[in-house]
Amino acid sequence: MNPATESPPHLMHAFRDARLAQGLADAIAQAMPPDRDVRVMEFCGGHTHALSRHGLQDLLPPRLRLIHGPGCPVCVLPIGRIDQAIALAQRPGVTLFTYGDVLRVPASDRLTLRKAQALGAQVRMLTSPLQALQWAREHPQQQVVFLAIGFETTTPPTAVAVLQAHAEGLRNFSVLCHHVLTPAAMHAILSGPEPAVIDGFIGPGHVSTVIGSAPYEAVARQHRKPIVIAGFEPLDLLQAIWWLLRQIVQGQHRVETAFTRAVTRQGNAKAQALMQQVFTRRESFEWRGLGSLPDSALRLADAYADFDAERRFGLAYRPVSDHKACECAAIVRGDKRPQDCRIFGTGCTPEHPIGACMVSAEGACAAHYQYGRWRDPPATPPQSTTQPA
């Protein structure tokens, strides 16, 4: 390469090097235990899409099964919460803002927020909660509500919006808060009368940049499952799988980080301080597929109760069952794959979704449909994965 005339290769190419990927795949094959299957859950929906987009399953041994987890914020939000938002948006004088994927999530009576908008509800899409804040400034006659969803990654921006509204004394801005917490979901997957058969977790990358790796240590210790935090490039994920296998074979259950360019043990202290200032934990919150989990979601702290849409509008929550034919709840739990759902790819497609897992850019069904993973052969039945004490 002539440095005077040519640019150096893009840094991202280093994380997609085919030769290195094959080397990691060979190391994974050598690390596989010879006498049983291994089941690894990628918690994050972004990892699910990266694994499918790059065809990484094709590099892995047949007895290494990747299980999709609940790390898709749209997928875990139950129908009752969407119904609640639709009803609020239909009130006179209310304008509801939220992220794009949420607009298409099916709710009761075949309604979505987008369909409610077509019927006259004031619903708008945003990419930052500060856009809702600006709308509130410009339309003081409107009650502006931000429907906030997501894991710890999207929680700090919501906190910033609340603090700004409080500083400005905006009386027409509030938050319908449905932020959820990652470690609580991991505990739920591994607890209960029928815990998921999982040998280890690929830990989420974006969430971990905020909370760090330390919060997963209690999960690994209590349930004796290794967790390796990964980035989103092919080599990131293959390295994480390799490290998980090494721990599984050795009977270890530590938290490791294969994404050190972005994740530390302590995480982002400033973001955590914002979250602690503005939010407090709910006693219980319903997740699709996981039921009502204690201390698993956030609401606004009492000091900011004036900006809590549930309190301001006296909103009550009513649980609603999913569509009878939809297996999204079982897919979120890791009990089933998208192709195990009888309406996958036929009655339920990204253009006409029946369940939330087909709607979201992080949903397992959308990933499998978009990248053709539904053509995979049936998986082998799970075997015992008891680890040595």
Image (cartoon, rainbow, N blue to C red):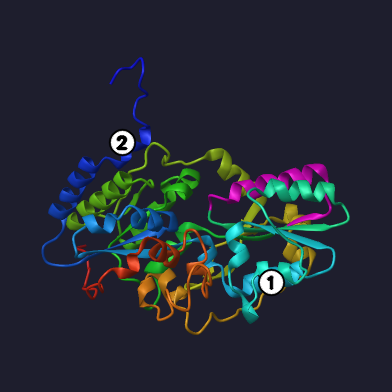
Q: Is residue 163 magenta?
A: yes
> Which residue is drawn at the image coordinates 48% and 50% (left, top)?
207
Name the outermost residue toward the right.
141
Residue range in magenta is: 152-174
From the viewer's perspective, tell me whether residue 27 is left or right of residue 226.
left
Q: Main secondary structure of the magenta part?
A: helix
> What is the x, y in percent for residue 281?
60, 59
Q: For the residue carrying disc 2, how many other residues have a C-alpha within 10 Å: few (<14), some (14-19), or many (20+)?
A: few
Quadrant the C terminus occupies: bottom left
Name the outermost residue toward the front.
5
User: Could you tell me if the residues under marks 1 and 2 are in contact, i.e. CB atoms within 8 Å?
Assistant: no
> What is the x, y in percent for residue 303?
74, 52
Amino acid at circle 1: Gln
> Which residue is drawn at the image coordinates 38% and 46% (left, top)?
231
Quadrant the N terminus occupies: top left
Name the mark on residue 109: none
Depth order, front residue of 387/110: 110
Amino acid at circle 2: Ala
Depth order, front residue of 219/117: 117
Depth order, front residue of 193/160: 160
Please indicate, yes or no, whether residue 282 appears anywhere in the rendered image. Answer: no
Mark 1 vs 2, N-terminal side: 2
Name the mark on residue 14: 2
> Which residue is drawn at the image coordinates 62% and 79% (left, top)?
110
Residue position marked by numbered label 1 in the rendering: 84
Depth order, front residue of 188/370: 370
